[in-house]
Amino acid sequence: MKTILTVIGKDQTGIIAGISQKLFELDINILDVSQTIMDEYFTMIMLLDLSKIKASFDEVKTSLTQTGDRLKVKVNIQREEIFDAMHRL
């Protein structure tokens, strides 16, 4: 299963490292990534492959949300098909 992960928050050191480390721990592969700084805000979007995860999607979502809370950023993850359906008009 592929998912879209977004991360937004005040720029600070360690955001990419913290998110990437958590993805590694969850056996999630990063397929593509784009990140930028907009004024003082860090923004990142990732395309992820969850085909090797051992946890449920809800457990992954909770773990990434908690990581975001620790890093003081907003993390959102959604299945690719839901993302596609929402953006197809």
Image (cartoon, helix red, strand yellow):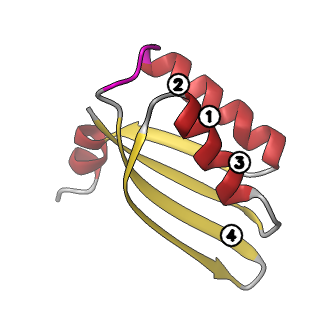
Q: Are marks 3 and 2 in contact (CB under 8 Å)?
A: no
Instruction: Give neighbour class at mark 2: few <14, some 14-19, many 20+ (Cα, 10 Å).
Output: some
- Marking on residue 60: 2
Disc 4 marks which residue? 42
- Residue drawn at 46 percent across, 30 percent down: 27
- Residue drawn at 52 percent across, 25 percent down: 60
Instruction: Give neighbour class at mark 3: few <14, some 14-19, many 20+ (Cα, 10 Å).
Output: some
Q: Which residues are magenta?
A: 52-56
Question: Quick one: label 4 or label 2, which is nearer the N terminus?
Answer: 4
Q: Are marks 4 and 2 in contact (CB under 8 Å)?
A: no
Disc 1 marks which residue? 64
Q: Alpha carbon of mark 3 to alpha carbon of mark 2: how far?
A: 15 Å
Q: Secondary structure at mark 3?
A: helix
Residue type at mark 3 is: Gly
Q: Are marks 1 and 2 in contact (CB under 8 Å)?
A: yes
Q: Alpha carbon of mark 3 to alpha carbon of mark 1: how far?
A: 10 Å
Q: Secondary structure at mark 1?
A: helix
Q: Alpha carbon of mark 4 to alpha carbon of mark 2: how far?
A: 22 Å
